[in-house]
Amino acid sequence: MVDSLEWWVPSVAEIPDWFLAIVCQQKAVGQGTGRWGEYAAQLLWQRGIRDPSQLAGFLNPKDYQPSSSFALGEEMQRTVNRLAIARQQGERVVIWGDCDVDGITATAVLWEGLGQFFPADFLTYFIPNRFTEDQGLSIAGIDALVDCTLIVTGGTGSTNALEIEYARGLGIDIIVIDPHTVDRPPAIALINSHGLPTHHPFAQLSGVALAYKVVEAMYETLPETPQRPLEDLLDLVAIGLIADWVELKGDCRYLAQIGIAKLQQTQRLGLVRLLELCKRSGDRPTDISWGLSARINAISHIQGDARFCVELLTSLDPSRCQHLAEETELANIRCRSLQKDMAQQVKARIAQLDLSTTPAIVLSDPQWTIEVLGLVAAQMVQEYQRPVILLGIEPFANTASEAKGAARSPESINLYSLLKEQGHLLGSFGGHPLAMDIRLPTENIDLLTAAINRQLRQQQPLTILTERRADLTVTVAELGQGLFRELKLLEPYGIGNPVPRLLIQNCWFEKVWHRNVEDWRGRKVRYIKTEFELWDEGTQLGFPGVWWEHYRDEILPGRCDAIAELDFNTAKKRYELRLITLRPTRTLAPSIQLDWLLDYRGLPQPPTTGVLQLDQCPSHWDELQTLFREAVQTQQKLAIAYPPPPLNLPSQTWQTLVGIAKYLSRTGKAATYQQFIQKLELSDRALRLGFQTLEILGFAVNLQGDQLQVTYQAVERVERQAEIDQAIANFLEILQEERFHQHYFYKVPMTTIQAIAYQTVRGLIE
């Protein structure tokens, strides 16, 4: 998508020599000479990481002194005392986890860590099914426990005061380990980071890190008992920390740093296979955020049962781990497909909003798959740089309905504070400042939308939400190993220290091509990526890159400005760019007039005479450039007047096409070619492919005069099922690409069309 936001890059600061010297001390052998360290120093300085007493520990975990688990004070001491009593008295202990990645890894850490102190028969774990059970503690779940006298939660429980009181009435004590916002529940102990002062080294710890600290306290209290090193748990800690998107500072950053080092050498059979499947080595935070956590999350989103993942992370059975990892990969593929379809629907809805006056996006739909709303909302936040709330609607009590969904936010907005102000409209909400799950009566959706938008407009200028920020301006020649290793000094990235975004100006793209991603078996996945080479005037060699979930036609012709992240592709063993956004290079000259370009998109009555008119959506920039040249050469105005794109999904269009074919074959009636085009909102190419697909199903489409007749003869579907499935998949893929073009060109800002027109006209003049 061409970026319509304003771009902002911080000015280059004057870095003190002493500061640059500390950064350069981290230089490794083989990293070159010259300006090495200046970009890393610039980033650190911009982000306020300047204290010389803390800088070395920030860059290198060997120079950081972690705090004792007992820095959590009396609550930790009560936790250890209660666990010690349970061990001495042979009590049955249940670990009660949560179905997100932080909750799953917290459960695995407690399962393995406390397993060093409790016999296997006296320790078990339970995670509610995302589809069929309430999240967090539940009375039904507590009733199902047999002979349990102690529950230890992993990343949940802080809002379950009623359920905790119920458990106490049954003689069950509960230790709550939960990082989320809390009014202290009546638990026997609460291990929680949210209420700590902001300067506390544990203030940012997620559920898995808090679980690790509990296990660490047990190791310190009973050092002779454990048989496995405590450090064996750190790979799990790193996965949960990175996936939970917490601010990585203090002990939180330290645990993530040493955990990633442990992950790179992990012996966990399930993790080893997962890393193979996602073609990553485990030495980068992005190996977790783009690889492991997406796959672990997919299991509960697709299957509902997250206990599957705890076994994947902890099992010692090679064949079982192989099976679980590949099932996880299949769930991830399915999840990405659902996410892609829903993202297309959401973008179509967003296109109907006036974002210049809408600080927060709130959308609902009864057809949306609730389990992937959080993934899509996070994607929309990255694209539109504002809070996004997506809601599915569930039947409730047969008379009313309840909306349930996900809220996500950019770093500039505290989502918890935003929603807390409107708590009277919500049934429930919980999470952390950037990601929350919410429930509310459907009749309150419009009230919530109006309230939070009004609240945001009062709190801060809308310009904060309409800026696209880059961190550093670089050239293509500076991309590569040296810059990558320098920026890697600041890893792991997170809140307050985001992945550096690089601005490359006046560049252009070559060898552009898009294709479907393939799974580990070589089968195509319905997930697009565009590959390219990036060039500018200062390089003799293009630099490779990829743009995920974008088609090649979105790469603008001519000179561009681009914002991207620098990455290392483990599978291809090369450094490459991950493109974030682009725009035409802003070099419009006043000597070239563009008043002959008219934007009539969305207007009811475009001009019909005296102008060239584009009333069908183009599929490529070349089509627009051809019209630009014709308009200039014939001295006519050009009206961009194609209609809004259809909102229906490709699968819905296919079902409609089959339905029409069945109706015509059954009734003997006919329809014109143009009627098919108008009813289905298809291009000529897509409709012809649709007819070919119908023929494989047994429908014969014959043209008689200007009428299309459809007849049907049953085919043996079992023998031809693979052929039928492939034909339908090909039709849906073509239609998906066509729909993408329609949405893309309908939303392209007029300033971008003008910029491409300017470059085209300048070429004619020169």
Image (cartoon, helix red, strand yellow):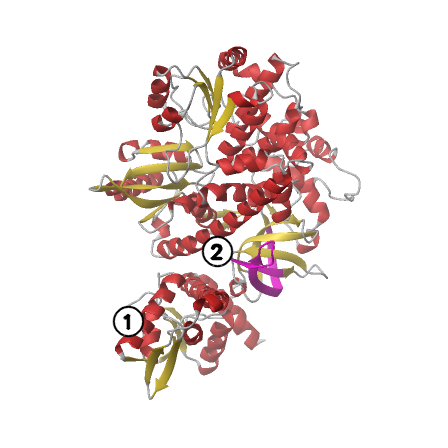
Which residue is identified by label 2? 3
- In this view, the residue farthest toward the left is 399
Element assignment for label 1: loop
Local crowd size for mark 1, using a 10 Å CA cut-off: few (<14), some (14–19), many (≥20): few
Q: Is residue 360 visible?
A: no
Q: Is residue 120 visible?
A: yes
Residue at horizontal 32%, vertical 37%? Answer: 439
Relative to 327, is 134 on the left or the right? left
Q: Earlier in the sequence, mark 2 or mark 1?
A: 2
Element assignment for label 2: loop
Q: Amino acid at mark 2?
A: Asp
Where residue 369 sits in the image (x, y, percent)?
38, 48
Determine the main secondary structure of the stretch shown in magenta. Answer: strand
Q: Which residues are magenta?
A: 503-532
* Among the 4 quarters of the image, the one containing residue 259: top right
- In this view, the residue farthest toward the bottom is 705
396 lies above or below 506: above
Where residue 100 sits in the image (x, y, percent)?
47, 36
For the residue pair 93 and 60, the one nearer the viewer reads as 93
Where residue 111 sits in the image (x, y, percent)?
55, 26
Which residue is identified by label 1? 605
